[in-house]
Image: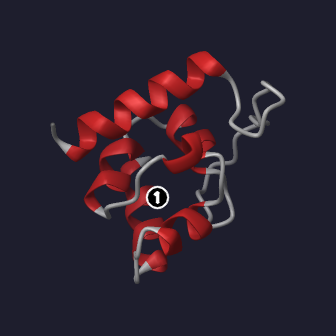
Amino acid sequence: MSLIKTIKEKFAAHREGGCCCGHGQSHTQAAPKTITKDMIVREVADRWPQTVAVFGDHKVDFCCGGAHSIEQTARARGCQDIDGLVADLNRAIQ
């Protein structure tokens, strides 16, 4: 199974089951126009589905249902170029 397909399946399953933090509510707020490293992975992917492929390209998956910041998740997955990831995410939403 491809990494992108796995990420999409995890994202879809998480959306159906609520937040992994246990309270079952979405963290989504009014969406900004620029992605920053402190934004929540799931919120970015939910707002801009085209970013799922970018996360996959950078080997950043939706551990914990994408409930953590881009920076925290990227570091946990061994991504060394977080600024590059954020730049690629922003290019994807233009």
Which of these two is toward me, 72 or 53?
A: 72
Which of these two is toward me, 71 or 19?
A: 19
Hey, which quadrant is residue 36 in on the image? bottom right
> Which residue position holds label 1?
90
* Residue at figure coordinates x 36%, y 40% from the top left: 7
* Residue at figure coordinates x 25%, y 34% from the top left: 5
Is residue 17 placed above or below 40 in the rendered structure?
A: above
Residue furthest out toward the front = 22
Hey, which quadrant is residue 14 in on the image? top right
* Residue at figure coordinates x 38%, y 43% from the top left: 52
The quarter of the picture where the N terminus appears is: top left
Residue 11: horizontal and vertical position, in percent? Answer: 47, 32
* Residue at figure coordinates x 54%, y 63% from the top left: 73
User: In screen coordinates, is 46 left or right of 8?
Assistant: right
User: In screen coordinates, is 11 left or right of 34?
Assistant: left
Color theme of the render: secondary structure
Q: How many discs mark residues in the rendered view?
A: 1
User: In screen coordinates, is 78 left or right of 6?
Assistant: right
Residue 37: horizontal and vertical position, in percent? Answer: 61, 67
Which of these two is toward me, 3 or 92?
A: 3
Residue 22: horizontal and vertical position, in percent? Answer: 79, 33
Residue furthest out toward the left = 1
Residue furthest out toward the right = 23
Crowding at dot 1, Cα within 10 Å, few <14 / some 14-19 / many 20+, comes out as some
Is residue 73 placed above or below 12 in the rendered structure?
A: below
Which amino acid type corresponds to the residue marked 1 in the rendered image? Answer: Asn
**SS for dot 1:** helix
Residue 3: horizontal and vertical position, in percent? Answer: 24, 46
